[in-house]
Amino acid sequence: MLAAPPHRPTHLNDLLAALLLGIIEGLTEFLPISSTGHLLIAQHWLGRRSDLFNIAVQSGAILAVSLVYRQRLWSLASGWREPEQRDYALKLIGAFAVTAVLGLIAKLAGVELPESVLPVAAALMLGGIAILWIEGRSEHFEALTRITWRVAIIVGAAQVIAGVFPGTSRSAAAIFAALLAGIGNRPAATEFAFLVGIPTMFAATGFEILRYFLNGGSGEAWADLGVAFVAATVTGFIAVRWLLGYVKSHRFTVFAWYRIALGLLLIGLLWDW
């Protein structure tokens, strides 16, 4: 298990740790390298946090992507009567519905994220190998020009898989599921993955907040959560803007090698933990 620090840090250190966790979340939520995996690793040194913290801080990064795509979101909302806009919006809703239903089933079944390092390391490496394979085969995939219902359903299911296995990366699972389903355009696959992540993560945060208050609603460090949320929003905005420019002319190969290297490093350090 990821052990908590032996001595309780001061309040200032708590805020600093929360700030660092927020920065890590913002930088890794949309890069295909797993924000949840990085948070679990970072919390080995910075102190364990609640499920509410780990979910809610991701919503800071989701707020960032909402700001980046604010014009796209407005066009989808205001252009509902236009067939093309309505079709895209319905497929976003469909993908979210798949994620919500399968995610709820997983929750009711008692599926919980493992909190040990080995599953994170394994998922990082396996995900890296999968990215290399997909990128190597991408030229042979069917290149669809628009999001289909098949793509939407597969992307929705992929998000649940990422939620169950830390180190998988929700954004990576959604992006590469879209590519495998036939969306040959990386920016288009990235956009759909990011947009469907907006209701997904906000819904997950709402679920955790509801569960928190139903269980008594005490013990959460709200100041720490606020600091982390703001940090994740700011760094997430920067990371998303950078990635959207990057994928226009680059493959995701560099992230695959990063995942493999980090996974190997974690396994090498595992014996000392």
Image: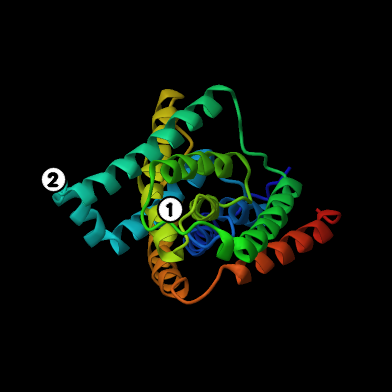
Can you give x and y, in whole percent of width and height, for residue 98 in the image? 43, 34
- Identify the residue position indicated by label 1 in the image: 193
Relative to 239, is 66 above or below? Answer: above
Mark 1 closeness class: few <14, some 14–19, many ≥20 residues within 10 Å: many
- Identify the residue position indicated by label 2 in the image: 81
Can you give x and y, in whole percent of width and height, for residue 69 in the image? 29, 60
Q: Element type at marker 2?
A: loop
Tally the marks. Answer: 2
Q: Is residue 157 left or right of residue 83?
A: right
Circle on res. 114: none
Res 241 quadrant in image:
bottom left
Can you give x and y, in whole percent of width and height, for residue 159 in the image? 51, 43
Can you give x and y, in whole percent of width and height, for residue 76 in the image? 22, 51
Inter-mark Cα distance, 1 to 2: 23 Å
Residue closest to the eye, 95 or 140: 140
Q: Residue furthest right?
A: 271
- Taking the spot 25% from the left edge, 59% from the top edge, the residue there is 72
Please say whether residue 217 is visible from this viewpoint.
Answer: no
Query: Which amino acid is tagged 2?
Result: Arg
Q: Quadrant of the N terminus?
A: top right
Q: Is residue 258 left or right of residue 105?
A: right
Please say whether residue 152 is visible from this viewpoint.
Answer: yes
Relative to 217, is 139 above or below? Answer: below
Q: Is residue 34 left or right of residue 92?
A: right
Res 111 quadrant in image:
top right
Query: Which amino acid is tagged 1?
Result: Ala
Mark 2 closeness class: few <14, some 14–19, many ≥20 residues within 10 Å: few
Relative to 245, is 102 above or below? Answer: above
Q: Element type at marker 1?
A: helix
